[in-house]
Amino acid sequence: MMLPSSRVTPPENAGWPGGEYSRRVEGEVQIDYNVQVPMRDGKNLLVDLYRPAGTTLDLPVIVAWAPYGKHGALSFAGWPGHDVDLDQLSKYAAFETPDPMFWTRNGYAVIMADARGAWGSEGDVTMCGPEEADACCDLIEWAGEQEWSNGKVGMAGVSWYAVIQWAVAARRPAHLAAINPWEGWTDLYKEVLTHGGIPETQFGAALGPLIANTHGQVEDMLTNSMNHPFYDEYWQSKAPDLTAIEVPAYVVASWSDHGLHTRGTLEGFRQISSKQKWLEVHGRKKWQNFYDPASLARQRAFFDHFLKDEETEVSAWPPVRIGVRDRAYLGEIREENEWPLARTEYVPLYLDGGRGTLSSEAAPASATTSYEAATGCAVFEHSFAQETEITGYAKLRLWVEAQGSNDLDLFIALQKIDRDGNIVTFPFFATFDDGNVALGWLRASRRQLAADSTPEQPRYTHQTEELLQEGDIVPVDIEVWPSSTVFHAGETLRLIVQGHDVNSYPQGLFAQGHTYTRNAGKHVVHTGGSYDSHLLLPFIP
């Protein structure tokens, strides 16, 4: 579905080295630049092909696909706080991609592709749509049929390089043998550009210019978001059928990417039909974690097993490994049998608007707390008498009233407070260190629950709006994205409810933000008595 396109920037003006074919040998690696790969409509992709020099047959293949520029148009140097050890990477490692030199040294062919329409690849850029998935499938099949290939192709990479894996695997190309999605959304609308019905404006605005280097057109996501405020066929076309995925999958998520990749990566693992699938969830910055030597060793074990038919440690991997956070970079790595954890006990903590507390018993008398919608907040706290682990999905039920508006945009944060009253922060969004335990969002007019909603994980229809009338007091169930944190005796869980971003960053930074809210006047939160406002938490015995 082709909709409004953004400005077009000729690649020559963006550092593009050109699209002429060439070959060079560097040490033990042969590099073929700008190899043309045909797509089903007769247009051509441009890819760079890395192979071990002198090895001509039976090579397993790893494909990395995104619109950011296979030649390295983006670099980690432009993102302060990334914490990637750049000294361990070769100059051929592009932004968020596997390092071709690492994989060729270990007996692989690596294909770095410019996505359909990006840079020198022909066509238009339709972001995360069926045209892109079809074109990548054509590349997978081409790679599996080359004389130097062993017929087994895997896919790797972070973010966009992971998102495309869900879409391609759902189409089941014959030569796709394994995927390793490292933190990638599965639903662009629900997980990235519209949080609980609230339009996201900062990440989406920063993403567009990064992919606007093409001779064709680039789909204008921000304009289309405004033109398609509900979850219609346009957005549904960008959400792959995860249940159709059957290929072996090593899925990596993080607790640190709320508002971008956390929810979708976990949804991917839960919904895919693969009989051989593994989940790892960490609490670090995604780029640093991807290139960490221990992570590379696990990636290699996975691909050696499924692309080379070698017996590796994968056979003994637990189905799930999670990092239970204590504070930044401190915690326990634990093996589990499933996600979410079967032994989870969902425990409600009831809000008391009069005292600002969270308690195991609901207050018998009703109370209210209010705040200025544009600037204020409401705070509720619960101190733990014994060590308590919170791991999994959470929900906040609020009874709310809007004074001076017909809608409310609600921004939710859970924080950890140590015994000295200090906020414990965590890595956040790839480059920041001011992260919370968990985040949630909801526009009150989008409170209609979908059929697959559960008590611990609300899901929304996003098909219509139900605005508030003066004096309305309505219940809203707010999805709080999954997390894992341990609280020691004497430490406190803080709940923040407000009408603006809990973490805000200057425009231009690669972060999330929500500029256009419907907040005005005051928000009133009703608790106690007949108003069962509560935070439902996943306690692990």
Image (cartoon, grey):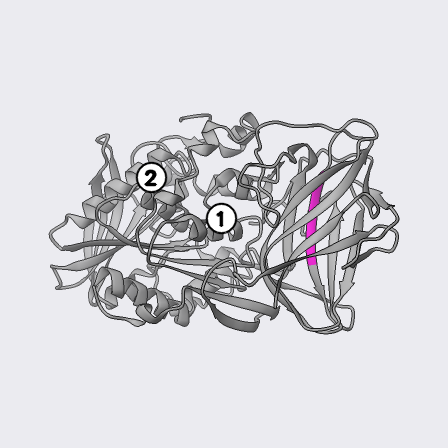
Residue displayed at 87% across by 56% down: 355
The image shows residue 257 at horizontal and vertical percentages of 55, 54
Q: Is residue 531 above or below residue 503?
A: above
Q: Would you say residue 21 is visible in this rendering?
A: no
The image shows residue 7 at horizontal and vertical percentages of 46, 31
Residue 148 located within the stretch drawn in magenta: no
From the viewer's perspective, tell me whether residue 402 is left or right of residue 466. Answer: right
The image shows residue 371 at horizontal and vertical percentages of 83, 44
Q: Would you say residue 224 is visible in this rendering?
A: yes
Q: Is residue 101 above or below residue 162?
A: below
Residue displayed at 52% across by 61% down: 341
Q: Nearer the viewer, residue 241 or 362?
A: 362
Q: Is residue 157 above or below residue 68?
A: below
Q: The N terminus lies in which quarter of the figure? A: top left
Q: Earlier in the sequence, mark 2 or mark 1?
A: 2
Residue displayed at 29% across by 60% down: 100
- Element under disc 2: helix
Q: Which residue is mark 2?
A: 133
Q: Which residue is mark 1?
A: 264
Magenta part of the chain: 409-414
Q: Main secondary structure of the magenta part?
A: strand
**Residue 178 bears which disc, if any?**
none
**Three-letter amino acid code of the residue under disc 2:** Ala
From the viewer's perspective, tell me whether residue 515 is left or right of residue 280. Answer: right
From the viewer's perspective, tell me whether residue 190 is left or right of residue 414. Answer: left
